[in-house]
């Protein structure tokens, strides 16, 4: 009986952590898409991209209802103005998969 429990645990535990990591990556990507939309709404209203700073200080509550945080660490996203003058954001954890891929964000 103990062997069966050990085998089941050996199968379930890695699957659980893999599923949890996948869900955290997808949640982070959804947060980044929300922030991206808010950046463009800000640009449409002010005809300029938002300045450097924390997302909560700049985009909440006018364009985003609540301050989004990375589900892995709970850290708040930060806006950065790039050399081209556009504001971008990235996950504060810099973990693989916590990005939007080829969208430039």
Image (cartoon, rainbow, N blue to C red):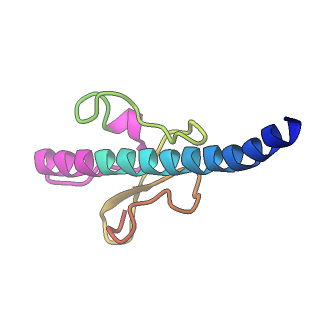
Viewer-proximal residue among 73 and 76: 73
Q: Position of residue 77 (x, y in %)?
A: 47, 44
Q: Main secondary structure of the magenta part?
A: helix
Left-right relation of 93 to 87: right
| Image side of residue 58 versus residue 24, left or right | left
Q: Residue 97, image x and y in percent?
A: 51, 61
Q: Residue at x 30, y 45 (%)?
A: 34
The question of residue 59 being in magenta is answered with: no
Please tell me which residue lies in front, 30 or 15. 15
Q: Nearer the viewer, residue 70 or 92?
A: 70
Quadrant of the rendering where the C terminus is positioned: bottom left
Q: Which residues are magenta?
A: 36-58
Viewer-closest of 67 and 15? 15
Residue ranking furthest to the right: 2
Q: Quadrant of the N terminus?
A: top right
Extreme residue in the front direction: 1
Q: Is residue 89 above or below residue 53?
A: below
Image point (76%, 48%), residue name:
10
Is residue 45 shown left or right of residue 86?
A: left
What residue lies at 80% left-to-right and 41% top-to-bottom?
Answer: 4
Q: Does the magenta portion include 40?
A: yes
Q: Would you identify the image quadrant in which residue 2 lies?
A: top right
């Amino acid at each position: 009986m103990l062997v069966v429990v050990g085998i089941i645990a050996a199968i379930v535990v890695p699957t659980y952590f893999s599923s949890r990591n996948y869900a955290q990556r997808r949640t982070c990507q959804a947060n980044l898409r929300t922030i991206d939309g808010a950046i463009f709404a800000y640009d449409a209203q002010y005809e300029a991209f938002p300045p450097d700073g924390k997302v909560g200080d700049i985009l909440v509550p006018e364009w985003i209802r609540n301050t989004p945080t990375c589900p892995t660490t709970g850290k708040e996203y930060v806006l950065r103005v790039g050399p081209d003058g556009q504001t971008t954001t990235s996950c504060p954890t810099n973990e693989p998969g916590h990005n939007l891929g080829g969208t430039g964000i």
